Amino acid sequence: MISHNRRVSQRDQSNIQGVENYQPILGSNISVGFGGVQNLHPVPYSVLCPATATFNTPRINVTTDQAPISRVEFNALPPELISEIFIHFAALSPFPFPSPDTTSGPLLLLHVCTHWRALASSFPWLWSSFSTGRRNLYPHPTLAEQWLARSGSARPLDLKMELPVLTDRVRGAELMGLFVANAYRWREVRFELDKSLAERLVCLPRGGAPGLEAVHLNVAMCPELQASGVLGLLGSCGRLTRLSLVLDGFVESLMVIHWERLTSIHLECSMSVEIWISLLTRCSQAVDLSIKGLDQPTTYIPILEHTPTLAHLRNITVESRYNASLFLLQFTLPVLESLSLAFNIPGTLELDLDALIRQTPLVKLALLSDSLAEDTILACVSQDSLNSVSELVLTSNHVGEDAIRALTFSGKPGVEFLCGLEKLTLGRYTGIHSSFVQMVTSRHRPEKMGLSRLRAVTVIDIPDLNFYQEL
């Protein structure tokens, strides 16, 4: 129910941000029946703008009468109330990289009502990110140009362009040219491009993207460009802190990147162990690290005079054909909390996790492989160094119920493996029965059963046993 007993002060003529400020007169009352707000249901939260956006919020006192609620058409609400609802909707949650179609992003906000159309058109932060890729291949350049124009000429810009296979070269080139022309505004970019589009990046002058903070660049399909100045451009980005690179192989221009400034690194590149160690030694500020391409046997690991310390590194993911734990032992990792090792080599494999884990406050361990032998897995996790681990993920086909029983029933009084484990995730097993999972997580577990703190077991990728139970 709308109470028309409302009085609002005159509009603030000095406001220059396009949002009118209302100061309620003392004693005024605006009552809103929530039935009217329900008309907003078709607007999903996925179209909302970043919650960090700053703007002037109208101040209106809203109270709810105890009288029966009567539904009110959304367009019948007072304009200032519609503005208030828009502000709250637009600031609830982030929506990175909206697609330029009428089903998502700010374009959907334009179609709610005429009031929201005017509001959505006037807020630059709603238009400060743009995506084109496999889902919406080639938006019209006029649309992209209008979109970027609405984002303002000085506001940071986030762009995503995934066109590894180009079918419309003319329109693709027009879009890429438009993006490159706005390089001075780039804050975060995700590019997966074919050769013709990636060549446009070479035209960027050094320092052409001074505000760039995050980059995802996949040029694995363009090996000739890797040796060009594309990667060298990243060396001139003084604010770059997050980097994701997918390369076909090592290039010298990698060394000009300021690795010591990066906090988040994802690197897919086939390189020698020596180069990997040389690069990671420079990553002194890294917090999250993911590497793929450690494809040289770790017997070739050089002996270092001094052990580098990665003092801020908390999360590591390594995908390798060989013993990645030996590689990681070349570093001191005093604050490491999460370790994920992915293997793609069959048979047994000696994992020297004990020495690695004893030097870290590890709380999460993931061993990801389809082929690691059962005795290898058990040898890894049946060590007292893992008693601090609260979350364990195992995805080998060779580990079944007998292996898990070996962990849960120690057989020796006072001996318990993984005594701090609270969450266990098992993947792709054929030998794990739901009855056993229930027993492991039951409050009435057998006296000799270990894992006393275990509270959750997840079995994944098995239709019959997609079982998850929390106590």
Image (cartoon, helix red, strand yellow):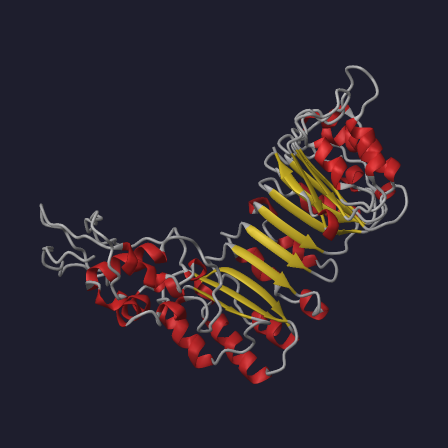
x%, y% of residue 73? 26, 66
x%, y% of residue 332? 69, 32
The answer to whether residue 196 of the structure is visible from this angle is yes
Between residue 257 and residue 24, name the one nearer to us.
24
Task: Give left or right: position of 132 versus 4.
Answer: right
Quadrant housing the C terminus: top right
Label total for image: 0
x%, y% of residue 196? 63, 77
Task: Give left or right: position of 64 versus 236.
Answer: left
Between residue 164 and residue 89, name the one nearer to us.
89
The image quadrant that residue 53 belongs to is bottom left
Q: Residue at x 50, y 52 (%)?
A: 238
Q: Residue at x 42, y 76 (%)?
A: 145
The answer to whether residue 358 of the structure is visible from this angle is no
**Residue farthest along the right direction in this orientation:** 347
The image quadrant that residue 74 belongs to is bottom left
**Residue farthest along the top direction in this orientation:** 413
Task: Give left or right: position of 380 versus 47.
Answer: right
Is the residue 189 above or below the residue 134 in the image? above
Between residue 273 and residue 389, name the one nearer to us.
389
Quadrant housing the N terminus: bottom left
Is the residue 102 above or below the residue 265 in the image? below
Q: Residue at x 59, y 36 (%)?
A: 312
Is the residue 110 above or below the residue 388 in the image? below
Is the residue 99 above or below the residue 409 in the image? below
